[in-house]
Amino acid sequence: MLKITSLLFALIILSGCVLTKVVTVPMRITGAVISVIPVVGESVDAVIDQTADAIDLIPI
């Protein structure tokens, strides 16, 4: 069990910037929910998506 847990942890760390994904995934979900609001939803979703893209580029 310890070997499997260690392997999974190593794969998560090596898969990319986990810290930025922890921040941007909730942002993208919130943007998707907000996008259903008429008139302003799409523009707010676009801004949130651009911000999440910028955060994903941070090399942590």
Image (spheres, rainbow, N blue to C red):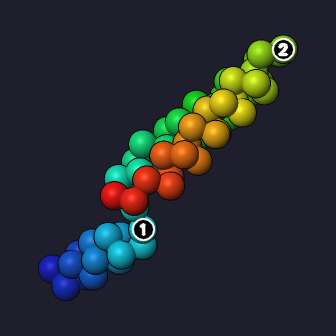
Whether residue 1 is visible here, answered yes or no, is no
In the current view of this chain or complex, which residue is farthest to the right? 39
Question: Where is 53 relative to 2, above or below?
Answer: above
Kindly identify which residue carries mark 1. Answer: 16
For this view, does 18 lie left or right of residue 1?
Answer: right
Query: Visible in this render: residue 36?
Result: yes
Query: Can you say which quadrant of the picture contains the C terminus?
Result: bottom left
- Precedes in sequence: disc 2 or disc 1: 1
On the rendered image, what quadrant is the N terminus found in?
bottom left
Packing grade of label 2 (10 A; few <14, some 14-19, many >=20) is: few
Tell me the quarter of the picture where residue 59 sits: bottom left
Label 2 sits on what residue type? Val
Place of residue 15 in the rendered image (x, y in percent of width and height, measured from the top left): 42, 73
* Residues under numbered marks 2 and 1 in contact, where contact means CB atoms less than 8 Å apart: no
Quarter occupied by residue 2? bottom left
Q: Secondary structure at mark 1?
A: loop
**Residue 60 placement, left or right of 47:** left
The residue singled out by tag 2 in the image is 39
What separation in Å lies between label 2 and label 1 (alpha carbons)? 36 Å
Is 35 placed above or below 60 here? above
Residue 56, percent across and down? 50, 52
Amino acid under disc 1 = Gly
Q: Which residue is depicted at the point 48% across and 46% down?
A: 55
